[in-house]
Image (cartoon, rainbow, N blue to C red):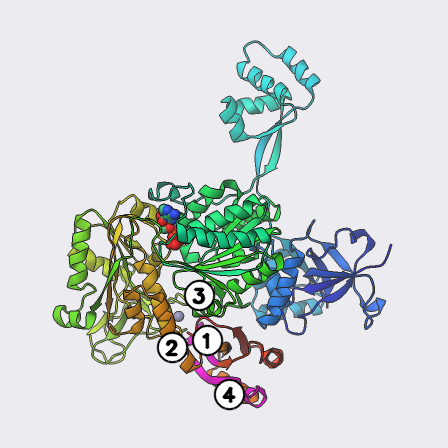
Amino acid sequence: MAQSYAQIVVDVPTQQTNRPYTYDVPDELAAQVQPGVRVLVAFGHRSVLGYVVGLTEALPEDLTEAQVKDVLTVLDERPVLSSELLELAHDLAKKNFSFWVAFLALMLPTALKASYRKELTAKAGLSDSDRVAYLDGQKQVLVKMKAFSAKGWRAIRNLQKNGLLDVRTVVENQGKVKTELAYKTNADLEVLQKIDNELSKGAKQQRRLLNFAMAHPGQTFSKKDWQAQLDCSLASLNTAVNKGILEKVQVEVKRRPAIMGAKALSGSLQGQKKVLNDEQQAAYDRVTSAIEKGQNKVFLLEGITGSGKTEVYLQAAQKAIDRGEQVLFLVPEIALTPQMQRRVEERFGDKTALLHSGLSSGERYDEWRRIHDGQVQVVVGARSAVFAPLDRLGLIIVDEEHESSYSQSENPHYSARDVALFRANYHQAPVVLGSATPSLESRARAQKGVYELLTLTKRANPEASLPQVDIVDMRQVQLDRGDTNFSQELLDKLKAHLKRGEQAVLMLNRRGFSSFVMCRDCGYVPRDPNCNLAMTLHMDSRTLKCHYCDYQEPIPRICPACGSNRIRYYGTGTEKVETELQALLPDYPVIRLDQDTTRRKGAMGKALSDFGEKKAQILLGTQMVAKGLDFPDVTLVGVLNADTGLGLPDFRASEKTFQLLTQVAGRAGRAKAQGEVVIQTFNPEHYALKYAEKHDYEGFYRQEMAIRHAAEFPPYYYTIQIQCSSPDENRVSLQTAKIAAWLKKRLPKDVLLLGPSPRSIAKMKGRFFFQMILKMKKQNEADELLRDLVDRSQKADQDFRLEVRRDPVSFM
Ligand code: ADP
Ligand code: ZN
């Protein structure tokens, strides 16, 4: 048998180890070691997890047999990563200046990720106090890496060096399979016959069980099935075991996430197919023709809210499924409402897998395995679902393609939209990017013919039309009526709609810092000591909280800066609006939807189904209420503060505001009754609001493109963000300036460097942040240089961190 070697990426995320290493494959493991399996290998003095990314027959020339270590053991019976995903991980790491292994790990459910533990064993001579400090007083313990601080580990290393302690690395596979008790019938008919002869006349239950067993020898049924089918007690099942009729077995069960509260959702959600209107049909024809031809085309489906985009997705998906292909359906987390889940499940039933952040790690693991086992035809999920292990992809849908949540800002950075394009290209399948308000980047690509533009201009429900939008100037309202969240106009409309038995959605835009305490005399604002952010007021717990690090403290009565007692809250939160609303309209209960009320699992589904059942006529919430909701009786939408997002230090502030207003306005008038929208603002003349008022995406697109062109921003330029951080403000500011100077000397002439400047949230979780922005015409112009920079920064000291983000979607 030919000697073979494996190329293995080890789970040591550093720049120096960001490449495959060659390992020897021992003969006895040769059958199991394949690309895509995880293995345990020796690395330095440790044993670490590794991912097999390739196999070679010959030893690479720069290595000798003696230098090559062997694979210690194989963790997976069959590959957990396909060759497509291996290639994708490599590509993403290169493009996003991150580690290969970080992407390999990202593609697998957390339950599969190995967790490392150390086994500490006391040796002769270890003092009692050390034994208490490190071994919990025992002879041997298994501890997590985070059980001790760096200081603790240093001490442990010293004990080890002095021969007082043994330290061993243990890798644990966390992927636990859930099993349940089941009963299997005896397969031996002769034995059953013998039992039959011996069974007493009175044993009716046993007789029935026995007859069933003789009719189904050697078959396994769950406890529930036995009880449901034969109506027998647990005791009689166990008696049958004692008699030898049945045998107890453990069978594997896969946890399926339930759709919380979906059962009671509104009546508009019939599962059956709709007859497409002309525009829908035209879009459907283009997409399905690409599916049939196996064409890697990208469609941009630009359709106003309620125009029936989802119906087009579902019917096109059906086409791919009928051809035996699979469909990946991405939705932003926030739009993955129980309504959407139910719509997909009603169409595709058991063949659907759902992946979203509300799942427990066990549920996530089980959904992943159903996909990996080929039992699934449609995967619906948020960002990370884009890595679902599908191997017969025939169509990829990216709904609300403009959503910034498709871009992961934490390390490793990636854009799910770009990953979708990669995968579709690999499978030669079409992609549908859908939105009422496409990102400027995508819309511009459609303009240039890179994507094919498909448009839906009418509401799909023939009786529905777009709502009438009114903009209300809150500057005047506050002059007339004092500090309030409700203009007279909004109040009057609310009363009128509610009186008719209709429903209203009210949105409080919480981008920006809205509900904080300020001293009316000196202007002092309490900030949290970790992040230096204005803290948010929580009336229920009477505390101030930081929304980034969760630091909290009591509300001060007296200003710590000037001693005044006129320290009051300023701005507003959903709780405060709810209180005011209940005082203004005491007869109408309110359902509140925000981070606080939806933290509990299933709480969002419950709130929405209550609203669907009309247990309340008013739904009040943050941006959460803007996306994807489809309730026929909602005829009024109120936006309480349209402008909090406009002041953000981000070139996309107008685009994001326009998108949000259009989305939320789209919740009104989805059925027969005419909808109305009231937008309250302090900037009534702003163009983002003016175009939202007219439902004019194309007009907004043209004006915003002109502005981006003049300011040299995307989509005319590509941007890359370089972010430096350190707990030491002076160091990071100095170091960032040095890096900027270093870059300026080496960057190609036409690459512009902005900054460095402290980020608008300069301090977070005890670290100070500075950023630089590069702007360039050609996408990859600075890549080489940036890789070099990342490489060098790795060698800098531990506390200094540098991250490079391509096409960042947030500059906060
Ligand atoms: P979008 O995804 O564009 O917001 P949806 O697909 O949710 O739109 O459709 C909006 C509403 O119109 C839904 O209640 C849907 O059931 C209905 N609908 C969609 N297509 C049709 C059609 N061809 N005929 C009648 N009703 C339709
Ligand atoms: Zn904080």
Look at the image and give the residue range highlighted in magenta: 743-772
Closer to viewer: mark 2 or mark 4: 2
As measured in the structure, the alpha-carbon distance from the residue carrying label 2 to the one carrying label 4 is: 21 Å
Which sits in the foreground, 578 or 287? 287
Q: Quadrant of the C terminus?
A: bottom left
Amino acid at pointer 1: Pro
| Residue 640 shows in the view | yes
**What residue is shown with label 2?**
649
Which mark is first along the chain, 3 or 1?
A: 3
**Residues under numbered marks 2 and 3 in contact, where contact means CB atoms less than 8 Å apart:** no
Amino acid at pointer 2: Pro
Category of crowding for the residue at label 4, using alpha-carbon neighbours closer than 10 angstroms: few (below 14), some (14–19), many (at least 20): some
Category of crowding for the residue at label 1, using alpha-carbon neighbours closer than 10 angstroms: few (below 14), some (14–19), many (at least 20): many
Closer to viewer: mark 3 or mark 4: 3
As measured in the structure, the alpha-carbon distance from the residue carrying label 2 to the one carrying label 3 is: 16 Å
What residue is rendered at 19% in x and 63% in y?
Answer: 486
Which mark is first along the chain, 1 or 4?
A: 1
Q: Is residue 747 magenta?
A: yes
**What residue is shown with label 3?**
404
As measured in the structure, the alpha-carbon distance from the residue carrying label 1 to the one carrying label 3 is: 14 Å
Position of residue 692 relative to residue 333, above or below, is: below
Residue 366, x across and y down, in percent: 56, 47
As measured in the structure, the alpha-carbon distance from the residue carrying label 1 to the one carrying label 2 is: 15 Å
For mark 2, give the secondary structure. Answer: loop
**Residues under numbered marks 3 and 4 in contact, where contact means CB atoms less than 8 Å apart:** no
Considering the whole magenta stretch, tell me its main secondary structure: strand
Residue 782, x across and y down, in percent: 58, 80
Closer to viewer: mark 1 or mark 3: 1
Q: Which mark is residue 636?
A: none
Amino acid at pointer 3: Ser
